[in-house]
Image (spheres, rainbow, N blue to C red):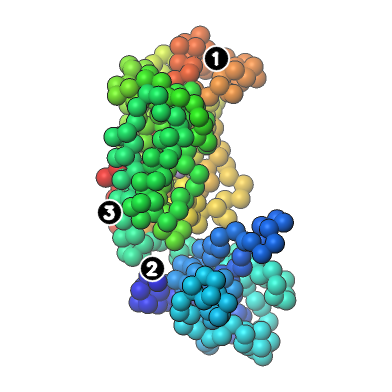
Amino acid sequence: MLFSPSVIAARKARVAKALRPLLKDSDVVIVHAGSPIQKPGGLDQTYPFLPHPSYFWLTGFRRPGGISVFTLSDGWIDFVQPVTREEKVWEGGGESYPGTDLKGFEAWLTGRSFTQRFILGQHPSSLDLAPEEDRAGLLEAFLGTRRVKDQAEVDLIEKLAAIANTGYRRIRESLRPGMTERDVQIEYESTVLRNGSEKLPYETIVGAGSNAAILHAIPTLRVIGDKDLVLIDAGADVQDYCVDVTRVFSAGGKFSDQQTALYQTVQRAQKKSIALCRPGVEWRDVHLASARTMAEGLKDLGLLRCSVEEALESEAIGIFFPHGVGHLVGLKVRDTGGPFNPHPKRYAGARLRVDLPLKEGYLVTVEPGLYFIDALLSDDETRSKFKDQIHWTEIEAWRGIGGVRLEDDILITESGHRNLTEII
Ligand SMILES: [Mn+2]
């Protein structure tokens, strides 16, 4: 088990405290691990099983089928699937997790005649349950608790940062013109896997030259030139915990003046945004600090015709910085920010996945970026919409440079923040 029994007990106590005021005696909260998903046409093959993050966080268990329930009178009960002889033969599966045999779950549930069942983990596919009740308040109470990282999680994230660092160091040592983006990916991934990463938390992004402007660039066989900058967005993962980091290198060992200007502008933005991170600060303000700093940079470089203020209000900055400044991270690359922002508002041209005030214990990525994206810069509609804001003739000299993004994982602390990926 990745987490000790005392860490798990403390998490269950924290969630219980958050749920109690919202529950009646006749309510039950059910958290499912989920079941393996069959591959289409794959006969007995399934995708690698990943437990629902809420279930894994709560129990530390990674076996399919498990169910954790909470009632006011019983507290938490874990129903677990014992390891079968078949599994021992085929998978070498070891010990079962402690708990009540899953076989007893349905009888327990019907025997208690609950009036409301709230499902907070994975939705079960095989169990015959009543339609879920309105669970928004409970879900927020649970995920709001989970969003605050405990010390064991912070320690693990720092360990993952050290693993990712071995991959980035390997890139620094091995990167040469003539390699392909795919070579860079292989150097990075083989190094972090050798150093303890169990898998990659997301598809590794490697973009050389103009490909660095593709936000989710899939590494290709493109040969890296000596004048190319190379953007790498890659992490490390242990049991779905991860770091999410982006760095930019020069293939030839030296940035051009333009590349330097771009890099330094993004670096200034990242520093400003990180400096703002502390409890009580609205996430949108962390985003707007980056947007403003980068608009100032573009203005200084002669790429804007309008004021910095107008670049933000007209959303012209969003042509160069089209994404949010970051997201919650930790247990999976998108941690618990999503469900509470189903219709994200736009701020300076970007939709924010998270629109919350920061609290102590939150872990967020701060990842401003500036890009020269062909699909936007060549678009007639964009060009006419922003004809008064963007210096289109000046832009031509920047086409093909790609983009720069710098990303670190920032823990919100009582007095401010701590950069958990700073060593990279
Ligand atoms: Mn990210």
Q: What kind of element bears circle 1?
A: loop
Foreground disc of the pair 1, 2:
2
Say whether residue 158 is visible.
yes
On screen, residue 340 versus residue 227, left or right, reads: right
User: Is residue 43 positioned above or below 270 on the image?
Assistant: below
Q: Mark 1 points at which residue?
A: 388
Q: Which residue is drawn at 43% across and 38% down?
A: 185
Rendered image quadrant of residue 120: bottom right
Say whether residue 288 is visible.
no
Residue kind at label 3, given as amino acid type: Ser
Q: Which residue is drawn at 46% across and 47% down?
A: 327
Residue kind at label 2, given as amino acid type: Leu
Q: What kind of element bears circle 2?
A: loop
Foreground residue, 368 or 359?
368
Residue kind at label 1, given as amino acid type: Asp
Residue 364 image position (x, y, % from top left): 41, 49
Q: Name the residue under label 2.
A: 2
Residue 344 image position (x, y, % from top left): 58, 45
Q: Disc 1 versus disc 2: distance between alpha carbons? A: 56 Å
Q: Name the residue under label 3.
A: 415
Q: What kind of element bears circle 3?
A: loop
Q: Disc 3 versus disc 1: distance between alpha carbons? A: 43 Å
Foreground residue, 322 or 240?
240
Foreground residue, 21 or 380?
380
Q: Disc 3 versus disc 2: distance between alpha carbons? A: 29 Å
On screen, residue 150 versus residue 32, left or right, reads: left
